[in-house]
Image (tube, helix red, strand yellow):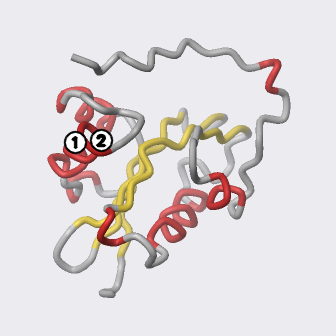
Amino acid sequence: MQEITLSDDKSRLDIGKIHHFLSTESSWAKGISLNTVQRSIAHSICLGAYTASQQVGFCRIITDQATFANLVDVIVWPEYRGHGIAAKLMAAVLQHPGVADVRRFTLATSNAHGLYAKYGFTALNKPETFMEIYRPDIYAT
């Protein structure tokens, strides 16, 4: 495996590759439009994972950079899984100066609880205080 570098420089992101994965392969954003992906990236902290020649991972943090952050769109492309890239992304996320000191950091996952638990994420402390508007089919055409 080639050396992996991480960067929060949005100009390095392969937005087409990110959009393709989210819109066709993810379980959470099937059908999402390119415009929506572009706007989400523009208004978030984004981290990319790269080999010398290409992007191999991505994640996005929605945050006010003071009190709250929400981790979303954590991706390691299938052919690069099993090489510790998700762990490198998570370490970089938690050390990022924009979110390192937020009071509340959330995420939603259906299948990676073990990974996120290694970095201090737990079930909601007070789930009875959280509410949501959830539109699971918003990207369906």
Q: Nearer the viewer, residue 115 or 141?
A: 141
Name which quarter of the figure residue 139 lies in.
top left
Report if the CB atoms under discs 2 and 1 are less than 8 Å apart: yes
Task: Report the Cα–Cα distance between label 2 and label 1.
Answer: 5 Å
Reading the image, the residue beneath label 1 is 19
- Residue at horizontal 38 percent and vertical 69 percent from the top: 6
Q: Looking at the picture, does residue 74 appear above or below residue 29?
A: below
Quadrant for residue 36, please give it: top left
The image shows residue 140 at horizontal and vertical percentages of 28, 19
Dot 1 falls on a residue whose secondary structure is: helix
The image position of residue 31, as x and y in percent, is 24, 28
Q: Amino acid at mark 2?
A: Leu
The x, y position of residue 26, in whole percent, is 35, 43
Q: In what quadrant of the picture does the N terminus appear?
A: bottom left
Return the residue nearer the eye: 35 or 95: 35
Left or right: residue 67 compared with residue 126: left
Going by the numbered disc 1, the residue's amino acid type is His
Does residue 81 appear to the left or right of 54 in the view shown?
right
**Residue that appears at 67% across and 59% down:** 114
**Quick one: label 2, few (<14), some, or many (20+) residues within 10 Å?**
many
The numbered mark at residue 22 is 2
Q: Residue at x 34, y 85 (%)?
A: 3
At x 37%, y 17%, the residue is: 137
The numbered mark at residue 59 is none
Marks counted in the figure total 2
Q: Is 76 on the left or on the right of 116, as rendered?
A: left
User: Which of the two residues, 9 or 75, is positioned nearer the viewer here?
Assistant: 75
Per the image, label 2 sits on a secondary structure element best described as helix
